[in-house]
Amino acid sequence: MSSTPTTNSLLEKLGLLLVAVVVLRVTRTALRLFYRHVLGPSALCRGTVDFAKCGRWAAVTGATDGLGKAYARQLASRGMDLVIISRTQAKLDATADEIRTEYPGRQVKCVKADFTDPDTDAVFGHLTRELHGLEIGVLVNNVGMSYPYPEYFLKATEDRGDKDTGAGGHGPAMFDNMVRCNITSMVNMCRLVMPGMVERRRGCVINIGSASSEIPSPLLTMYGATKKFVEKFSRDLNTEYSGGGKQGANITVQCIMPGFVATKMSKIGRTSWLVPSPDKFVRSALQTTGLETVTTGYYPHTLMIQAIGLAQSVSESMMARMVMNNMLGTRARAIRKQAKEQQLKSIGEATTN
Ligand SMILES: NC(=O)c1ccc[n+]([C@@H]2O[C@H](COP(=O)([O-])OP(=O)(O)OC[C@H]3O[C@@H](n4cnc5c(N)ncnc54)[C@H](OP(=O)(O)O)[C@@H]3O)[C@@H](O)[C@H]2O)c1
């Protein structure tokens, strides 16, 4: 059956409309990126927040590795004293020494805390005592945990009887740990630190979310969902407490949603344009604070999210299937690697016995 001229012209019009939408979206993104990263205040004056003027101390959770450590170092370079918080005393001491050597004159206070601990009253009681009396102007809620590798929702909490995977591994406690580490820690740290900021009428809270809350993240379903909470919480908290809110405070709350960064969590060792080092990423992210409430913080990651969004606007299900296939590939490789490691371990144990 041949199509009529009316059908042809309708299809042409629809095609033109689709092209126009795509061109508009790409142009808008390009202009926005150009303004924010080339022309705008972030490029001209290192962002709009003068961190040191927010208060003397910056508190950073998960500060002994990856993004948290990079935030700590860069806030020290901007004249702030630091409270660094994580689980391992040796790593805390080493990070504190490193920062004191790099930035002489800066004070670094170490606080040992495990945000997956089910006794949250004890954890935050301890933190309240440790932070008491400190003028904390900047809070970076960076601590977070993901899956050891992508896994089906119901399989991720199976008891595998493998003690070596530890608190961050798959197993019955993983989702509870994830909620405590990615959500409860942020909410309680804000409740602990923000009253001082409100009293002083200034401060800055940076919450680390993830690009996985914006793009499909099957097999990391719980992780993506906890990070969506981070985004929503930050956006509305910013409205409540920024200059425009009725609380009379001038607190900036920002959510950073990184794509891949080369850290222990991502298990990516080699950096590239799309996978920056933590230092490169954080330098870029800090330039957006005060300028953007919710952002990837790094323009190649913004481009990646926009490209995925564009593909989703063509076919959401196709995009979801593509990501799912990719995740299944990562899962299969991780399972093979784990089996190999287990085999080598058994051989090692057999030879020592
Ligand atoms: N890397 C990425 O590609 C990526 C992408 C998107 C979002 N993110 C987000 O960025 C944040 C930082 O990730 P990262 O890649 O920098 O991680 P990382 O390199 O693995 O560092 C994690 C830090 O958190 C501490 N930590 C881990 N579990 C903890 C717990 N239960 N209680 C207290 N401290 C704990 C670790 O020290 P101890 O082990 O000594 O406690 C370490 O200092 C996370 O929120 C993550 O979701 C990362």
Image (spheres, rainbow, N blue to C red):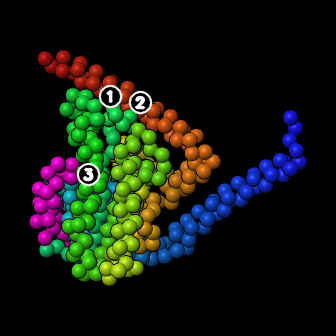
Q: State the extent of the magenta-drawn residues as a range.
A: 105-132
The residue singled out by tag 2 in the image is 333
Q: Position of residue 37 (x, y in %)?
A: 52, 68
Q: Is mark 3 on a helix, strand or loop?
A: helix
Specify the quadrant that holds the C terminus: top left
**Is ligand 1 less than 8 Å from the beta carbon at label 3?**
yes
The residue singled out by tag 3 in the image is 181
Q: Which residue is drawn at 61% across and 65% down?
A: 28
Q: Residue at x 36, y 46 (%)?
A: 223
Residue closer to the observer: 22 or 289: 22
Left or right side of 260 for 247:
left
Give the Cα separation between the discs numbered 2 and 1: 9 Å
Q: Kindly identify the amino acid type of the residue bearing the numbered disc 1.
A: Gln
Q: Kindly identify the amino acid type of the residue bearing the numbered disc 2.
A: Arg
- Please tell me whether residue 143 is drawn above or below residue 344 in the rendered image: below
- Please tell me whether residue 294 is drawn above or below residue 177 in the rendered image: below
Specify the quadrant that holds the N terminus: top right
Count of numbered badges drawn on the protein? 3
Could you say which quadrant of the image residue 256 lies in?
bottom left
Q: Is mark 2 on a helix, strand or loop?
A: helix
Left or right side of 298 for 89:
left
Residue closer to the observer: 124 or 166: 124
Label 2 environment density (alpha carbons within 10 Å; few <14, some 14–19, many ≥20): few
Q: Is mark 1 on a helix, strand or loop?
A: helix
Q: Which label lies toward us, 3 or 1?
A: 3
Q: Where is residue 116 in the image (x, y as percent from the top left)?
A: 21, 49
Q: Which mark is residue 338?
A: 1
Q: Which label lies toward us, 2 or 3?
A: 3
Give the mark nearest the N terminus, 2 or 1.
2
